[in-house]
Amino acid sequence: MQHHPPTTGTNPPPGMKAAAAGALRKNGAPGKPLRILLVEDSPLLRGRLENMLSQHAAFKVTGLAAAEAEAIEKLDSVPYDVIVVDVELRPGSGIGVIRQARQRNKDPKDGSHVWIVVLTNYDLPTVRERCMQAGADHFLDKMREIDQLIPILLGIAGRKP
């Protein structure tokens, strides 16, 4: 399992060429939209993020969750290519979601990788480190780095922003 530091700009995630990005997706079809599980406890922000993501043909929000237990339950119901998760959930924690997602995707035999992007207001070094140790691929501050979410997801999808 690889962990990647947060990316900036419009480059694909480190270690991944744009043409190879599709090969890492569970559905194995680069032309199909990324299936995204959005885990956010604020109904207002969850709605805004869902709307923002739905503006792109490269993405499809196929699951929404507001709490840790609800998100973990959804991990078993529908396959996801990407999980966008907040750290502080009521109730629960995004770190628990990250750990469970990694536990379920420990050693994918088919070369797939479920990407995890943390989107939080808690941009503290200790929180960032805990998320990355739990298995997050990217860590973004909602206030300062939300504009990097789309380029990161497009990089994962193997498309140029």
Image (spheres, rainbow, N blue to C red):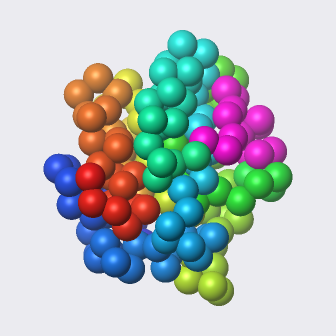
Q: Nearer the viewer, residue 105 or 134?
A: 105
Q: Observer-nearest residue: 13 or 133?
A: 13
Q: Residue at x 27, y 42 (%)?
A: 148
Q: Nearer the viewer, residue 40 or 11?
A: 11
Q: In the displayed structure, does residue 132 sit left or right of residue 34? A: left
Q: Residue furthest bottom?
A: 109
How many numbered marks, from 0 up?
A: 0
Q: Position of residue 14 (x, y in %)?
A: 27, 68
Residue 70 is left or right of residue 93, and the answer is right
Whether 42 is drawn above or below 50: the answer is: above
What residue appears at the point 35 percent right and 42 percent down from the top-left corner? 149
- Residue placed at 51% from the left, 43% from the top? 84
Farthest residue toward the top? 44
Location of residue 25 in the rendering, given as x and y in whole percent from the top left corner: 54, 70
- Residue 94 in picture, x, y percent from top left: 57, 38
Q: Does the rendering let one see residue 132?
A: no
Write the residue at 36% across / 55% down.
Answer: 154
Does 127 appear above or below 26?
A: above
Residue 80 found in image quarter: bottom right
| Residue 145 horizontal/vertical position (percent) | 26, 34
Q: Which residues are magenta?
A: 61-74
* Residue 39 drawn above or below residue 10: above
